[in-house]
Image (tube, rainbow, N blue to C red):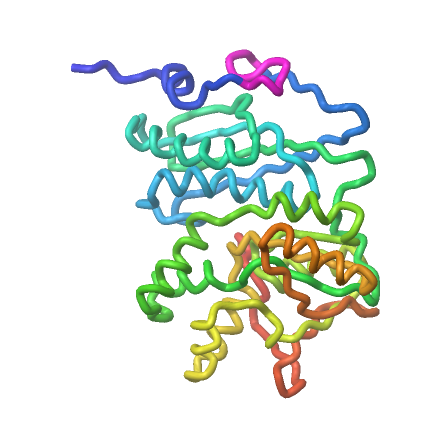
Amino acid sequence: MKPSSSEFDLIKRYFTRPAPGAVLGVGDDAALLRVGNGMELAVSTDMLVSGTHFFPDADPFLLGHKTLAVNLSDLAAMGALPRWALLSLALPAADESWLERFSAGFFALADQHGVELVGGDTTRGPLNLCVTIMGEVPQGGALRRDGARAGDDIWVSGMLGRAALALAHHQGAVRLPTAELVDCTAALHQPAPRVALGLALRGMAHSAIDISDGLLADLGHILESSAAGAEIAFDALPVPEILRTLSSQGRGEVAQRCALAGGDDYELCFTVPVSRRSGVESISGRLNLPLTRIGSIVAGCGCIVRAPDGSAIHLEKSGYDHFR
């Protein structure tokens, strides 16, 4: 009978790799990192809890991808270049087939973005995944939430509402056709962090944030930090055609909730002066990434969402909150 692996065996087997960009990586009490001259260190952390952020039977490869992706999205929103990560895992058991798949998904995305795993922790407990991500940004050059100015255009990347639609399908709130379900489920389980976009927006965007809790909630953070208001047009939002179909079928409330408050999109919302519209369009073409202008920053506070007839759309809940 094969003896069970120790915590250190598991770390060595599945999570220890060379980290040439670090002075010292996995294997000691702490990692040693050297930040480039004239650079600042951007640091963020996110925790994913089984049953709250993902289904308990989630594919471990896709879960490994998403665990890193949600953190890369935070660095993208800051315009930071990802460099290093720490990974902490609480595991119900030392399931090596699960760990092999999870680490494969994690490192596949890490390799795409040049991220080195330089430390972390493992323990026994309910499945809980936590990454601390670190990246570099030129001094004073980070994208922030507090720079939006009245008159700025509001832009979003990619498409909104697909992850929320997939979740609504799995919860029985809607029924998606097969093709749309495949597309929306991929958006939910394997989001693409917009790192290249964040880097391209340095020196151009006045403010930025990633859309993890829903457009209204996350845009609201920009507005609060910038002491500004916003007006956006619901019809301008880039959403899948199935969402517009739901609206035409009398499911407008579901469509609005998915597009405006669904969360888990991991797209970027950013504000740019009107004079830079052509620059944003150039970035869109260069990255082959749709970027859509959805409204404007205005004086005041709060966000008004306009329906096609000009009336204001009101949602009971503007986004995801862990304690509500």
Q: Where is residue 152 drawn, in percent x and y?
A: 79, 64
Report the span colored magenta: 19-29
Where on the picture, by quarter, is residue 270?
bottom right
Asked if 310 appears above or below 215 in the picture, the reply is below
Residue at the image point whose x is 67% and y is 69% from the top? 294
Q: Would residue 170 appear left or right of 280 to someone viewing this image?
A: left
Q: Where is residue 144 drawn, in percent x and y?
A: 75, 48
Q: Does the stretch in magenta take in 25?
A: yes
Which of the pair 240/30 is nearer the observer?
Answer: 240
Identity of the residue furthest to the bottom in this view: 309
Q: Would residue 38 appear left or right of 3 to someone viewing this image?
A: right
Identity of the residue furthest to the top in this view: 28
Q: Would residue 102 appear left or right of 255 to someone viewing this image?
A: left
Residue at the image point whose x is 64% and y is 16% from the top? 32
Q: Does the stretch in magenta take in 291?
A: no
How many tags in the picture?
A: 0
Residue at the image point whose x is 20% and y is 15% from the top? 2
Residue at the image point whose x is 59% and y is 28% from the top? 84
Screen quadrant of the N terminus = top left
Name the main secondary structure of what is drawn in magenta: loop
Q: Would residue 174 appear left or right of 17 to someone viewing this image?
A: left
Which of the pair 92/276 is nearer the observer?
Answer: 276
